[in-house]
Image (spheres, grey):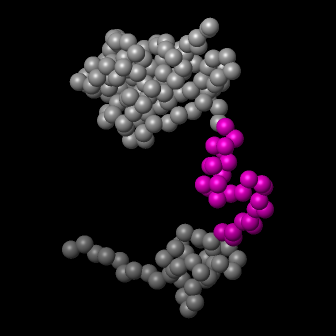
């Protein structure tokens, strides 16, 4: 009997120094053996560390690693699980502000957007799955009959498109100020 082995990479983009041993422990717990990372300074975020770790384990280990590290404050990471025969790969990305994101990947490592995800996005946007007739464009402000609806305080922006002001042929002038 041949057992399937999954492979991937854990990229810890930034972790506070105090959190590094805990990240190693959580990843090792998900993989099923103790691990040690080679931590280096993160040049962009002062006081943070970064590491790359290549792992092997049972199928689904990438999801287990991402689940163990998900939601940790100040931890930015990425987990990949390479595709195998008949199975797409996966990629999990996490930032403290945005949370976790999962995507399927093809054999070349490109993110694949499934049809169901596209349909869900279209439903959320309120568009139909079929081509809907487009509404005619709205006229620009200050053109045609809408010109009179432009408030007086904005007419100077429209220049020659604004209707003339009634009763005034020239703009009022201010008296010259004198310095004392």
Question: Residue at position x 60%, y 54% from top?
Answer: 124
**Foreground of the two, 169 or 95:** 95
Left or right, 51 with respect to 102, comes to left
- Residue 173 image position (x, y, % from top left): 44, 81
Question: Residue at position x 28%, y 23% from top?
Answer: 22
Question: Residue at position x 66%, y 20% from top?
Answer: 107
Q: In which quarter of the image is residue 70?
A: top left
Q: In which quarter of the image is the N terminus?
A: top right
Is 111 included in the stretch rendered in magenta?
no
Question: Residue at position x 59%, y 70% from top?
Answer: 158
**Foreground of the two, 129 or 136:** 129
**Foreground of the two, 143 or 175:** 143
Left or right, 73 with respect to 125, comes to left
- Residue 147 image position (x, y, % from top left): 63, 78
Q: In which quarter of the image is residue 3?
A: top right
Numbered range of the magenta stretch: 114-140
Q: In which quarter of the image is the C terminus?
A: bottom left
- Residue 55 image position (x, y, % from top left): 46, 13
Is 128 included in the stretch rendered in magenta?
yes
Q: In which quarter of the image is residue 179?
A: bottom left
């Amino acid at each position: 009997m041949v057992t399937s082995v999954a492979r991937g990479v854990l990229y810890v983009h930034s972790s506070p120094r105090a959190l590094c041993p805990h990240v190693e422990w959580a990843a090792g717990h998900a993989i099923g053996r103790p691990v040690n990372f080679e931590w280096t300074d993160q040049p962009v975020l002062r006081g943070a560390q970064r590491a790359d770790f290549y792992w092997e384990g049972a199928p689904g280990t990438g999801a287990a690693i991402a689940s163990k590290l998900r939601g940790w404050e100040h931890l930015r990471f990425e987990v990949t699980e390479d595709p195998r025969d008949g199975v797409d790969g996966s990629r999990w990305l996490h930032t403290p502000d945005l949370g976790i994101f999962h995507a399927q990947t093809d054999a070349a490592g490109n993110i694949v957007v499934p049809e169901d995800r596209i349909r869900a996005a279209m439903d959320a946007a309120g568009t139909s799955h079929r081509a809907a007739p487009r509404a005619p464009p709205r006229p620009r402000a200050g053109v045609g009959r809408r010109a009179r609806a432009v408030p007086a305080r904005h007419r100077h922006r429209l220049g020659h498109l604004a209707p003339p002001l009634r009763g005034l042929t020239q703009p009022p002038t201010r008296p010259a100020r004198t310095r004392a």
